[in-house]
Amino acid sequence: MFNYVIDDELVLKLLMPEHARQMFALVERSRLRLRQWLPWVDGVTEQAHIASFIQNAVKQGSENGGFTAGLWVRDELAGIIGYHQIDWQSRSVGIGYWLGEGYEGHGYMTSACRAFIDYALLEMELNRIEIRCATGNKASRAIPERLGFVFEGVLRQAEKLPGGYVNHAVYGLLRSEWKLLG
């Protein structure tokens, strides 16, 4: 089971069914900010929706397709990070993430991404990691830029959000590049 202690403050724990209540509460507290960048937020209206998401994440993990973890800051759920479906043929994966209200600006997600990158490239021996985020989401874009990802381009109108379509910035990192950074 993935359980990664980053420091005295931050721990990554595999997302499990018993976390549904805390995750739903975090989404509720952060709803206005999250809905600006995440298309699923308006559809999460009860804890059962989160429970279903977690169940699917656990299933994906059990099928070796990637996993999802919670970021726990001083024993409080602060956000979520996960691998999208792993492409074992091409040895590549995408990483998605979000932080709840009040946890931004402390470096938590950068640290979590660094741990997920290490795990994917060094433990799972994948070759490529991709991060996509809305071009207007400067906080989210700063993470791959800070971690040495290469900006590969823009996908036009890649996602429909409550405010309309947004373009996605695409960032990629290769295993050979990460070793050079380490």
Image (cartoon, rainbow, N blue to C red):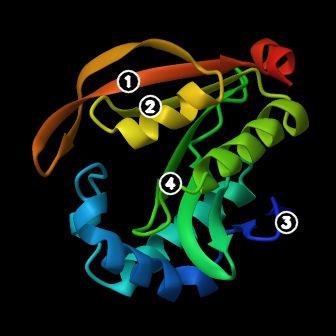
Residue 1: assigned label: 3
Q: Can residue 15 be seen in this view?
A: no
Marks 3 and 2 sit apart, C-alpha to C-alpha, by 27 Å
- The residue drawn where x is 81% and y is 59% is 6
Q: In this view, does 13 lie to the left or right of 36?
A: right
- Find disc 4 in the rendering and name its residue: 105
Judging depth in this view, the residue of 26 and 86 nearest the camera is 26
Residue located beneath label 2 in the image: 132
Q: Position of residue 178 (x, y in %)?
A: 78, 21
Query: Label 4 amino acid?
Result: Gly
Q: Are marks 2 and 1 in contact (CB under 8 Å)?
A: yes
Which sits earlier in the primary sequence, circle 3 or circle 4?
Answer: 3
Provide the secondary structure element on which disc 2 rests.
Answer: strand
Indicate the position of residue 106 as horizontal and vertical percent values: 57, 57
Find numbered disc 4 in the image and state the secondary structure of the residue it sits on: loop
**Relative to the observer, which residue lies in front, 60 or 163?**
163
> Can you tell which mark lies on residue 169?
1
